[in-house]
Amino acid sequence: MDIKRIFGNIFDAEILKFNLQHVSIFIAVYENMVNMVTENVKGFYLQGFSQLDLDGSCSKSLEYSMNHECYHEDIDGYRNYYSREYKEKIIDHKVNGKRNILLATMNWFVENQAMTQEEFENFLIIRDHRNKYVHEMTKFLFEGLPESSQQTFIDLLQLYAKLDKWWIN
């Protein structure tokens, strides 16, 4: 890497500002999309909830939870109950031998025809960009953004909008 370019990327306020804004907004939009898709699918499988007692127990649990028919988690003083299908399709779903709720959720969208396999593959590229931005931010500030960064951001926005609108249909 050319030393003049590195210094130009760091000490030119406009270039540094643009690169920081791009990386920051990309990460924020990505994280919002991830939250939206995982919470919407989780909510789709929500069966009910009950308030936890002060000691963290749940005296008014739903009858089917006693039969181990559902998955539950405790959040903010409530026990949320999800169908067994959520546990099977999302929680226990393995990708490359590992549990991954995000990838399981995105596969769920493919299975339910909310996105294509090609869009799923594109999501993996978007996720890779996000991971590089998060873990190698200094590199991008010194060396500049990859040429594909603008198109990947557009792809992220389009996928986010598509999956968000899918719930309305």
Image: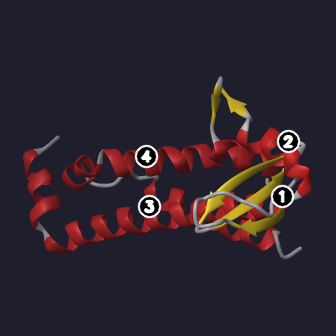
Whether residue 54 is visible: yes
- Label 4 residue SS: helix
Q: Mark 4 packing: few (<14 Cα in 10 Å), some, or many (20+)?
A: few
Residue at numbered disc 2: 68
Q: Earlier in the sequence, mark 1 or mark 2?
A: 1
Viewer-closest of 145 and 94: 94
Q: Name the front one of labels 3 and 2.
A: 2
Question: How far apart in space, not on screen, are marks 3 and 1 (Cα)?
Answer: 28 Å
Q: Residue at x 20, y 74 (%)?
A: 14
Question: How far apart in space, not on screen, are marks 4 and 2 (Cα)?
Answer: 37 Å
Residue at numbered disc 1: 45
- Label 1 residue SS: loop
- The C terminus: image quadrant: bottom right
Q: Residue at x 13, y 44 (%)?
A: 2
Kind of residue sitting beneath label 2? His
Give residue 27's mark: 3
Kind of residue sitting beneath label 1? Tyr
Residue at numbered disc 4: 131
Viewer-closest of 36 and 18: 36
